[in-house]
Image (tube, grey):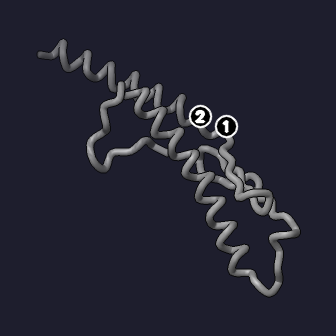
Amino acid sequence: MMRNLGGMMKKVQEMQSRMEEIQAELENQHFSASIGSAVSATVTGKGRIVSLKISSDACDPSDTETLEDLVSSVVNKALDEAEAAKSAALSDLTGGLPLPPGMKLPF
């Protein structure tokens, strides 16, 4: 029984170490999205915006609401890309088995 517990603890430590490696890798990756040539955004795997570009054609002073919607949409698309990469990494790490409800990667 103790041997099984020791083996299980070793596996948990290995998984934690690999999760930390994945976190570091994702922090350095950039994920981008764009809506035509009007607006584009790039975020890190940690969810930080590193680039936001808005074309002058998208800047209509009489319609700022559309620009706000475009920016929100493109940033959310880039964040979704980062989240999909995290999910894929988690799936690879756990062999496709989902984590228990409420348990997430530490980032």
The residue to which callout 2 is attached is 24
Is 77 above or below relative to 91? below
The residue to which callout 1 is attached is 28
Residue 67 position within the rendered picture, expressed as x and y whole percent measured from the top left = 73, 73
Local SS, label 1: loop
Local SS, label 2: helix
Left/right of residue 95 with respect to residue 2 in the rendered view: right
Is 27 above or below relative to 72? above
Q: Residue at x 15, y 16 (%)?
A: 2
| Direction front: furthest residue | 36
Along the line of sight, the residue nearer the viewer: 48 or 68: 68
Inspect the image, locate mark 2, and give the three-letter code of the amino acid beneath it: Ala
Is 73 above or below relative to 7? below
Is 103 above or below relative to 96? below
Residue 98 position within the rendered picture, expressed as x and y whole percent measured from the top left = 31, 37
Distance from disc 1 to disc 2, alpha carbons, whole Å, reads 7 Å
In which image quadrant can residue 26 be found?
top right
Along the line of sight, the residue nearer the viewer: 69 or 26: 69
Along the line of sight, the residue nearer the viewer: 35 or 92: 35
Q: Residue at x 60, y 44 (%)?
A: 45
Inspect the image, locate mark 1, and give the three-letter code of the amino acid beneath it: Asn
